Image: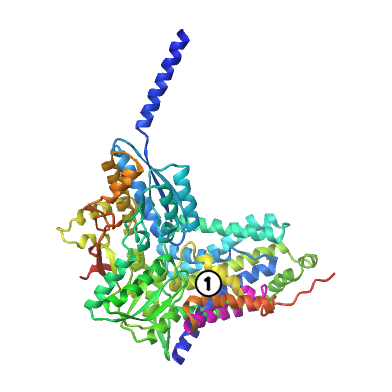
Amino acid sequence: MLDQLFQFLVTGITIGSTYALVGLGFALIYNASDVVNFAQGEFVMLGAMTAIALLAAGLPLPLAAIGATLIAVLVGLLLERFAIEPALGASVVATIIITIGAAIFLRGIAMLLWGKDFHSLPAFSGDTPIRLGGATLLPQSLWVLGVTVALVALVRFFLDRTLLGKALLACSFNRAAAQLVGIDVRAMLRLAYGLSAGLGALAGILVAPITFSSYEAGVMLGLKGFSAAIVGGIGNPMGAVAGGLSLGVLESLGAGLISSGYKDAIAFLFVLMVLFFEPTGLFGHKTAERV
Amino acid sequence: MKTGFWKSLIGALLLLVGGLANGAEPIKIGSFLTVTGPASFLGDPELKTLQMYVEDLNAQGGVKGRKLELVHYDTGGKAQDAVSFVKRLIQSDKVDLIVGGTTSGDTLAVIQEVEKAGIPLISLAGGVEIVEPVKKWVFKTAHTDRMAAAKIFEDLRKRNLTKIALITGDGGFDKSGREQILKLAPQYGITVVADESYGNKDTDMTAQLTKIRGADTQAIINFGFGQAPAIVTKNIKQLGIALPLYQSHGVASKTFIDLAGDAAEGVRLPAAALVVAEQLPDTDPQKPVLLAYKKRYEAKHGPVSTFGGHAYDGLFIAVGAVQRAGDTDRAKVRDQIEKTQGFIGTAGVFNMSPEDHMGLTLDAFKMVEIRAGGWKIVE
C-alpha cells in the first residue's frame, strides 16, 4: 500500500510539474497585461512539434530542442507584435478573444504542417525505468522535474532580482504608473510573450517523450495549466507552480485511491473549492478597488 | 406562326437536354466522417479512400452509366453535428445512400433520422449496438468490439490465462468494448479482477496501472484507440509489469508501434487481415483484394490503415447493391445491400442477411503479435 502511495505521488509530481510550467507562462503574461493568453497551450504544442520536426530533419536532439524553443519564442513575439499590440487599447476581454483566435490559428497551421497523427520524441536519456523503493519512474520524469525546478528558480530570480523583472511586475500593478516612471510597457509586453512562449515550448519538449504530441495536444495542457494558474492565484508565478503540483498530485491520488473515473472531477472540484473559499487563489494577492 | 414553331422547337430541345441530363444524373453518395478531432486518424483514411475510389470508378465510366458524386461533411467527432449533417444530406443534398459514421457515437446518434427518412446507411464504426438489434436501413462494415473481445478471449483460453485486468478509456469505443468484455468474460470462464479507466486525453496512466500491478491478475486488456493505448503500453513497461498485454483492433496501425516504441514488443491484438496482408497464404481469397487496396492507397497517401479499408468495403457494398438494383431506388438498394453475399472486402468476407447487417464472422480477425516493430500472425 505504501509502495502504491509512493508511486501515486511520484506520478502526480511529474504530471504536476508540466502543469506548473504551463501555468507559469499564463502567470507571466497575466502579470504584464492582465490578459489570460489562451494560446499558451499552443506554445507547448509548438515546442514539442517543432522539436520533433527538427529531429526528423536530422538535427541532434539538444540542437532540435534549442531550435524549437527559439522558434516558439519567435512565434510568441510575432503574435504579440501583429495580434496583441495593434489592439493595445482594446478591452481585456477583446484581447483574450484575440488569443483564442491565435490559438485556433496556430493549431490549424500545425495540422497543415504535421498532419493529425501523434508524434513522439525519444527520451533524453533512455527508457529504462529507475526503481525507487517500490515505485518506478522514467529518467525523463527526472528531466521534467529538474528543468522545472531550474526554470522556476530562474523566473523567480528574474522577477525579484533584476531591473527588467521588476519593471515587468510594475506593469502588472499599475500600467499607467509604470509608463510614467519610464518603463516601456510595449517592450515589457513583448518580453512577457517571448518568455512565456519559450517556457511553454520547453515544457512541451520535456513532456513529449512521455505524453506524445499532436496538433491538438495544447488544448488539454493549456486547460490544466490555466487551472494551475487560477488555483495558485493568477498573476503569482510561484502560486502557479504550487497550483500545478497540487493539481497533478490530486489527480494521481484521485485515480489511484478513489476511482480513475473521477480523477478529473476530483481535480476540478479542488479548483472550484479553492475559488469558492479563496476567490483570488491560494497565493493571490488580495486586491481592493480604490476609489 | 413562325415564332410558334421556333418556340416549340426550343421547348422540345430543352426537354431533350433535360431528359439527357436526367439520365446521366449522378449517383449521390452522402458521407459524414470524423476527419478532424481525436478520431481523425480513423476518419482521415476513410475519406481519402472514398474520394480515391469514387474518382477511379468515375474514370471507368461510373456505375450503370452514371457518375458517382460524393457529398461529405466532417463531424469532428461531435454526435450532435453528425445529426445535423445527416439531416442536411437527406433533406437538401438529397443523397441516394449514406456511407459513414466513423465512430459509434456519431452513427448511433443518426440512426433515428436515417430510419425515419428511410435511406440506406452503411456505417464504418465498430459498436455492435449499430446492428444489434437489426435496424431496417442500417448496415456496417467494421468489425465489432464483441468480435474483438471474443478473439482475445479465445487466445487467452489457448494460453490458459483466466484472470484479467481491464483498463479502458472514456470514449464510446472504449466503453462499448469494456461492456462487451465484461459481458463475454463468464462465457469463456474468465474473471475480471480489476477494471480501471482513464480519460482519452490523459497523459499518464501509471496510477491506474499501479493498482493493477497490486491485483492478482494474469493478463491485461486495454481497449481503446489513439495515443492513450500507446501511453498505457509505455507505462506498463515503465512500472515493470511483465504480464501479457492485449490491445484492441483500435490500435492496429503503424502509428501505435511508432509511438509505443520498444514497449510495444510482444503486445497482442486482434487485427484485420489488411495489417498482415503479405503474410497471408496465397490460397486466401482476401489476399489479392487486400494487396490491391494497399497498393492503390499507398501509391497516393502513404501507409494504409484498416479504417480506410472499412470505407472501401462500405463503398463497394453500396456500389454492388446499386448495380444489382439497377437504379437508386432507396428500398431496392436497401434490399440488395441486405442480400450481399460472398463479397470479399478488406475486413473479411461479407455475407449479410435480414438477421445480420454486418455479415462478418470471427475469422475476419487475425490474432497478431508485435515483433521487432512489425506484425506477426500468431494463430
Q: Label 1, on which residue?
A: A203
Main secondary-structure element of the magenta-colored stretch: helix
Horizontal relation, residue B93 to residue B276: left or right? right
- The span shown in magenta is A229-256
Q: Amino acid at mark 1?
A: Ala
- The answer to whether any part of residue B254 appears in the image is yes
Seen at 54% across and 81% down, the residue is A250
In the figure, residue A287 lies in which quadrant?
Answer: bottom right
Q: Residue furthest left?
A: B283
The residue lying toward the viewer, choosing from B51 and B188, is: B188
The residue lying toward the viewer, choosing from A78 and B43, is: B43
Label 1 sits on a secondary structure element that is: helix
The residue lying toward the viewer, choosing from B82 and B226, is: B82
Residue B268 percent coordinates (x, y): 29, 72
Does residue B124 show up magenta in the picture? no
Seen at 46% across and 7% down, the residue is B1
Does residue A233 show up magenta in the picture? yes
Horizontal relation, residue A109 to residue B293: left or right? right
